[in-house]
Image (tube, rainbow, N blue to C red):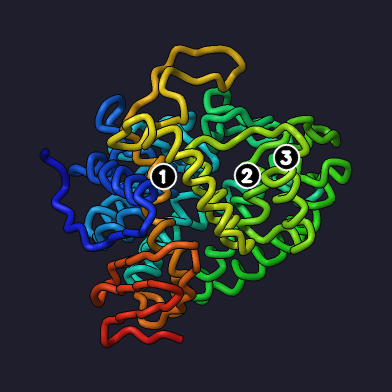
Amino acid sequence: MCTYPYHERGNFHCTDEKFNRIFNICRYTLRLCSHELIMDTPWREQAQWMGDVSAISLGGIYACFGDTALTGKFLWQSAMAQLPTGMFQYITQKWVGKWRNTTVDFSLWWVNALWNHYEYTGDENWIVRYYPQVIKLVYAITDYLDEFGLIGSIPYGSFVDWAKIDGLSFKQLHVKGENTFINALFYGVTDKVIKMAKIMDDKRMIIYLENIRTGLKKAFHERLYDENKHVYADANMDGKLSDLVSEHANMAAILWNLCDENETKNIIQTLFLEKKIPFTMAEPFATTFTLQALDRAGRIDLAYKIIRDRWGTWMVDRGASSVYEEWGINGTWRSGEYQGFIRTLSHAWSAGPAEFLIKNTIGLEIMEPGYKKIRLNPKDIGQDYNIIYPLPQGNLIVEFKEKQCSISLPDDVERV
């Protein structure tokens, strides 16, 4: 098999063989989709989709292989695909130059990935070099803040996931109304932009974004929370909450700290425990954000259950050797009718558990860029495990056995 020459430094192994198989097919898919560029799939487009790579593939590549050369090439190549509007092309291995070839969420995911790459490598030059592109995008989006302080109707497409989310369309160049996921994603990403601005000593941008974030957080709950259902609606259109409720919107609110502890508990109780109301379930790509949100809420047990129920049942139990683009393999029903667009069986954007099973299980946090200082909080997942995470300085090894944990760190990494 001819793929990019990764070294398999990272690993996850536990006493439950199903999770081992899930990890292995996720890691294998990341390898299948890595050549001279990071592709969405080796079968259909073979394209470097900005959202796929930024949101999922890069984190998996760091966790499984510790590679920064191919990931760095992606960031550089994608930065060169910024459009005059400030948005980014959604396919970035070539220049198209058409303003229609963009989505709001994919552009934001690139900014998120740029910060994550800096944190992994510890190299400030990544921020210095691409800060102008980041700020150009910020202005392109904040031009569409409405009178309530939220991103309102915006004349660009948005994707988020294959699942049907009210107000979003990949093909139609319009985000209708105030969309919950898009506003939450913007809020989360701008936190990292403020950190970039501090590196650049850009005081005006810090003040600008802090004011926007304050207004957005206040309006987010007032405009998007459904008090009767105890969850967030997909969108607010012309002052009316959408009837649709998605996993995407609610997990985004939790993940990016836009709801308090009580609201978080109510959302999890309503959607996952009591299942009180119908909601749109995330497909594999966006389920990764669900896993992160649940871990943030202290419910890694539910995250593991979802990994087993979805990747385990709908992929591993069906004999998958790589991860599918959607839970189903025969096409999408996003618009309410069968579209006949066959799904791929090796899609890197579905490989979220590769990073999650390694990094989140051991509670690894970067306290100083380049992993010079780290925080670790190995979780009790009800089984023994052995995990290796490739740091720039060498491998971090965590063994959890019979409720006892042992940790091996490279000499120049400090645990705080």
Q: Residue at x 47, y 35 (%)?
A: 102
Left or right, residue 22 beside residue 337: left
Q: Residues within 10 Å of mark 1 (few under 14, many from 20)?
A: many
Outermost residue on the left side: it is: 2
Q: Which residue is mark 2?
A: 182
- The answer, for residue 142, to whether it is visible in the render is no
Q: Nearer the viewer, residue 182 or 345?
A: 345
> Residue 408 appears at what percent x and percent y?
30, 80
Q: Nearer the viewer, residue 190 or 287?
A: 287
Q: Residue at x 42, y 37 (%)?
A: 90
User: Which callout, 1 or 2, points at the residue further toward the start of the chain?
Assistant: 1
Q: Which residue is mark 1?
A: 82
Q: Nearer the viewer, mark 2 or mark 3?
A: 3
Q: Secondary structure at mark 1?
A: loop
Using the image, tell me which numbered label, if any, was put on residue 275: 3
- Real-space CA distance between mark 2 and mark 3, rounded to the nearest whole angstrom: 24 Å
Left or right, residue 99 beside residue 348: right
User: Which callout, 2 or 3, points at the residue further toward the start of the chain?
Assistant: 2
Q: Nearer the viewer, mark 1 or mark 3?
A: 3
